[in-house]
Each structure stands twice: as C-alpha cells, then as structure tokens.
Amino acid sequence: MIDVSSSLWIELAAAACIGLSGVPGCLWRRSGAAGQPTAIAFNLIGSSVGFVGLVLHARSNEVPSLALGALPVGQLSVALDGLSALFLVPILLVSALGSLYGASYWSEREHPGSSRRLRLWWGIIAAAMVGVVLARDAVLFLVAWEVMALAAFFLICTEEERPEVRQASWVYLVATHLGTLCLIGFFSLLAHATGSFALWPGLKGDGPSWLPTALFGLGMTGFGLKAGLMPLHVWLPGAHANA
C-alpha cells in the first residue's frame, strides 16, 4: 500500500522550487540583474517550504512514501523518514544561506558572464541532494547522484577561463565518475543479492561469502571518492580552492 503524506509532497515541491531558481535569470538575458533577486526569492521560498514539510513530518509518526511508477530499470519511489529529514535540514539551510551570500560574493554586476550559470547550478545541486536523500530506489538514487555530480562540476568551473580551474574541474569529474562506477557495481550486486533495487530490503542469508566484502569495498570506494575520504581525496584540494 502506498502511503502518501502531505509532508513528502511539500518536500518535492520545495526541491522543484529550488531547482528552478536559476532558470528565470538564464531566460531574461536583457535584464539579467533581475535574475539574481529572483533566484534568491525562489531559493528562500523553496527552503522555507521544505522546513514546513519537515515540521509536519516531525509532528507525525508516519514514514510517507510515494511510488510514481516504473523506470526502465527500478522504480520511481521516494520516501521521507527520520534520517532523510535529518539530512534535509543542512541541505535546505545551506541552500538558502548560500543563495543569500552569493548576492554580494558573486553579484550580477561584478560577474555578468558567469553569475547566471552559478545561480542555475547552485539551485540544481541543492535540488539533486534533496532527491538523493528522498530516493528509495537505487536507480533513482543514482540519477539524483549523477545530477548532483554534474552540477558540482559546473559550479567548480564557473571561472572556466582560468587554466587551474579547468584542470581542477576535470580532475573532480574523473574522480566523481570513478566513484559512480563503483556505486553502480555496488547497487547491481545488492540488487542481485536481494532481488530488488529498492532501498533497503535486506540481504539474503544464502548469498556468496564474498558478497559482503565486495559490497563494502565498492561502497567505501564510491562514497569515499565523493566525500574526499583519505586517500581518495585527490580531487578535493584543487576543486575546493578553485571553487
């Protein structure tokens, strides 16, 4: 049975609002200065709506879920539980505060050539992170994960005219996709062992003895590359410094 709660719909609406925050500024090229306050407004509204959803979720003892249908592989399934809500707090907060900070740090007046791109990908990466923590299917998780990775790449290379920025962004892109390949292997093995791409149905007891070790190695490498876990942090110093 599908349990659909208003708090989950609110979080999805918040993600859509944040993800679209940079779009108007890209469309209004003749009046680009209006794009920045519009993006900030969309981001603040989306984050505020997201926090309203979290409050409603906290007042409920339910774990709302939504299944929108089948993907070519896996299911389009999302849910909101306590752990998801915990991660949504910093995502929504940083998204809103970063948008506000960008008004002076990377203003349209001082950076007319790149501020639109920065606002666009800032909204997309925040929305993708919301998708990552709400996903309840491995394929949907990987789609949101990949959108997040590509958005981060475009954010890093905002000043693409600088050679050191281009180098750092390409190092990051290679590293994050090596991690994604490991995660594809991780979820493929997990689906083979459980019979489903759902997160997380639990491992079968009759699996091969090497499966837990393989899952641990692939998961540690895939997530460790993304998190910059030593010694997998080769991309991190250059990417953070140039971003």
Image: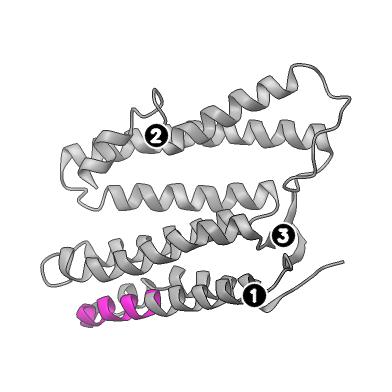
Amino acid type, residue under disc 3 in the picture: Ser
Provide the residue designation for mark 2. Answer: 228
Amino acid type, residue under disc 1 in the picture: Arg
- Classed neighbour count for the residue bearing mark 1: other residues with Cα under 10 Å, few (<14), some (14–19), many (≥20): few
State the extent of the magenta-drawn residues as a range: 30-43
Q: Quadrant of residue 169?
A: top left
Between 45 and 29, which is closer to the camera in this rendering?
45
Between 225 and 158, which is closer to the camera in this rendering?
225
Q: Residue at image x 87%, y 66%?
A: 1
For discs 1 and 2, the disc positioned in front in the rendered view: 1
Residue 166 pos. (x, y %) = 24, 40
Question: Is 215 drawn above or below residue 196 in the view shown?
Answer: above
Q: How many marks?
A: 3
Mark linked to residue 77:
3
For the residue labelled by badge 1, is the local secondary structure a helix, a strand or a loop? loop
For the residue labelled by badge 3, is the local secondary structure a helix, a strand or a loop? strand
Horizontal side, residue 62 vs residue 105: left or right: right
Can see residue 126?
Answer: yes
Mark linked to residue 59:
1
For discs 1 and 3, the disc positioned in front in the rendered view: 1
Q: Residue at image x 53%, y 37%?
A: 180
- Classed neighbour count for the residue bearing mark 3: other residues with Cα under 10 Å, few (<14), some (14–19), many (≥20): many
Cα–Cα span, label 1 and label 3: 23 Å
